[in-house]
Image (cartoon, rainbow, N blue to C red):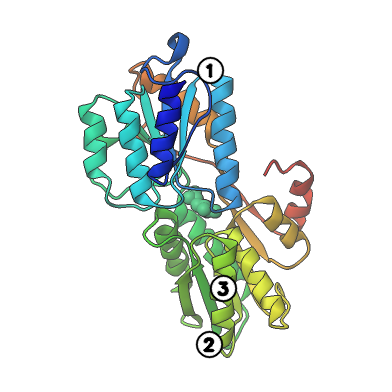
Amino acid sequence: MLKKRWAAAAAAAAGLVLLTACGSGGSSGGSGGAITLGFAQVGAESGWRTANTKSIQDSAKTAGIELKFSDAQQKQENQISAIRSYIQQKVKVIAFSPVVESGWETVLKEAKTANIPVILTDRAIDSPDKTLYKTFLGSDFIAEGKKAGQWLTKEFGSATGQVNIVELQGTTGSAPANDRKKGFADVISADPKYKIVASQTGEFTRAKGKEVMEAFLKSQPKIDVLYAHNDDMALGAIEAIEAAGKVPGKDIKIVSVDGVKDALQALADGKINHVVECNPLLGPQLMDLVKKVAAGESVPERIETQETEFDQASAKAALPQRQY
Ligand code: GZL
């Protein structure tokens, strides 16, 4: 007990919120031979992330896997510290969602030297060294950006003048921000009438999304569309649009990504026009992968999560059963 209290104090001092979800922890075999998984989460920045965390924690319990969980508060240095602490604790498997794409080689080489297999979930890294992790389980963010662009070019296909777009980007340097921007730009570049007149990070949060949208509304004489890399920033932007006396979904059309319940409600209410789903419920697939990797079985290098998109009618139909 003293050891756990010391570890928690040390982690708290390091700015880490280190939660040991269950079990005695500490050994690679875990208590009673259970597999011990160390998971370094990005943070708790959005509704998507909350659902992702719940899926991982619930699935670990169901799978009988002993989970050590940390919340890095969107800071890479905290994720790296968490991974190092899992290496020291000799966990059986490490999994994490890299907050940004680069800067992971050193710590992943330490995990490799310690013979601890690593699984990437949700977000990818830009290292060419594929031996640093066993598999990447997550969405195709370029495809998500393309879907948002395809909706826009359909919606404004008959527009004759310039279509002014403002873009709320996700966390700077993150795979979803880089790839959703690229996929969207690839599609709209087909027609010069589509112009991104302002683009800035809203850090995937409601508060920052509202703040940046307020600045866009002040600096841009005419905004036709908002493309938000996630729902939380879109929901924050809606507050700014309404405070400016404009009607979201009408004066300014909105397309966003994730598919959390609050965004589907805004879509049903006509305040958002289209939502591209990004599925956060990766827990069950992750635990299957953890068991296979722990047993030394081979797993596919890339596992892409399946997801859909929503218009107003399908949002209304999905809401009653929406888990998150
Ligand atoms: C996407 C995920 C993103 C979500 C955001 O897989 O990494 O991070 O789109 C979340 O809501 O903050």
Residue 8 lies left or right of residue 218; in this view the side is left
- 15 or 80, which is in the foreground? 15
Q: Which residue is mark 3?
A: 211
Q: Where residue 213 sits: x, y (%)?
A: 57, 75
Measured Cα–Cα span from mark 1 to mark 2: 53 Å
Q: Where residue 260 sits: x, y (%)?
A: 65, 51
- Of the residues shown, which amino acid type is indicated by label 2? Ser
Say what secondary structure mark 3 lies in: helix
Measured Cα–Cα span from mark 3 to mark 2: 13 Å
Residue 316 appears in the figure: yes
**x 54%, y 81%: residue:** 215
- Of the residues shown, which amino acid type is indicated by label 1? Gly
Residue 150 lies left or right of residue 136; in this view the side is right
Residue 129 appears in the figure: no
Q: Which residue is mark 1?
A: 64
Q: Are marks 3 and 1 in contact (CB under 8 Å)?
A: no
* Labelled disc at residue 219: 2
Please report whichever mark, 3 or 2, sits nearer to the chain's N-terminal start: 3
Residue 295 lies left or right of residue 265; in this view the side is left
- Of the residues shown, which amino acid type is indicated by label 3? Glu
